[in-house]
Image (cartoon, helix red, strand yellow):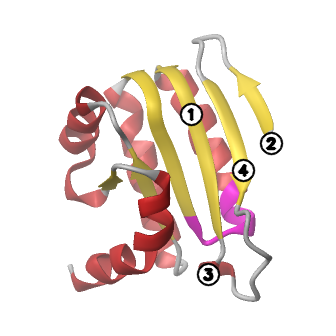
Amino acid sequence: MADKSSRSGAVLALKPASVPRVARWEDSVATVAVRGELDREALWGVDYSVGRAAAEAGRIVLDLREVSHLDCSGVPQLVARRRELLARGGDLLIAVRNPYIAKILKAAGGPDLVLLRSVEEGLVAAPAARLRALRK
């Protein structure tokens, strides 16, 4: 698992799924874990990491449970990345614990982002979230 620090103090970790490699891209899952403060520059790094993960896995769980601050100006990048993944048959789910961060994501991303309380919930809920998105 590689860690990458930005000038803002955010730390990114890209972790492939711990399950055996599956045959179909849309069935594989990867986790991008982030901690610290996320300004616009750090969110660019998060989006880049999610994009790298999406090359190998169709479902990405973005773990923001240890994020203490989030700049709302970068949230549209996450919405665009999720729309891109949905169009390709994948999904982007966000695990968030801090109510402050959840409110920012809801305000800036609206119904276009799926927020969860844990990474594990994201691994199990990914197919259900995809069905909900298709019904909209």
Amino acid under disc 3 = Asp
Residue 65: x and y, percent?
44, 36
Residue under label 1, please give it.
34
Badge 3: residue crowd in 10 Å (few <14, some 14–19, many ≥20): some
Disc 3 to disc 1: CB gap under 8 Å: no
Residue 44: x and y, percent?
57, 33
Amino acid under disc 2 = Met
Q: Horizontal placement of 108 versus 91: left or right?
A: left
Q: Residue at x 69, y 57 (%)?
A: 53
Quadrant position of the N terminus in the picture? top right
Q: Horizontal placement of 89 versus 99: left or right?
A: right
N-terminal of the pair, mark 4 or mark 1, is 4
Badge 2: residue crowd in 10 Å (few <14, some 14–19, many ≥20): few
Q: Residue at x 51, y 48 (%)?
A: 62
Residue under label 3, please give it.
27
Please give the range of residues in magenta.
Answer: 53-59
Quadrant hosting residue 2: top right
Query: Marks 2/3: CA distance?
Result: 21 Å
Amino acid under disc 4 = Lys
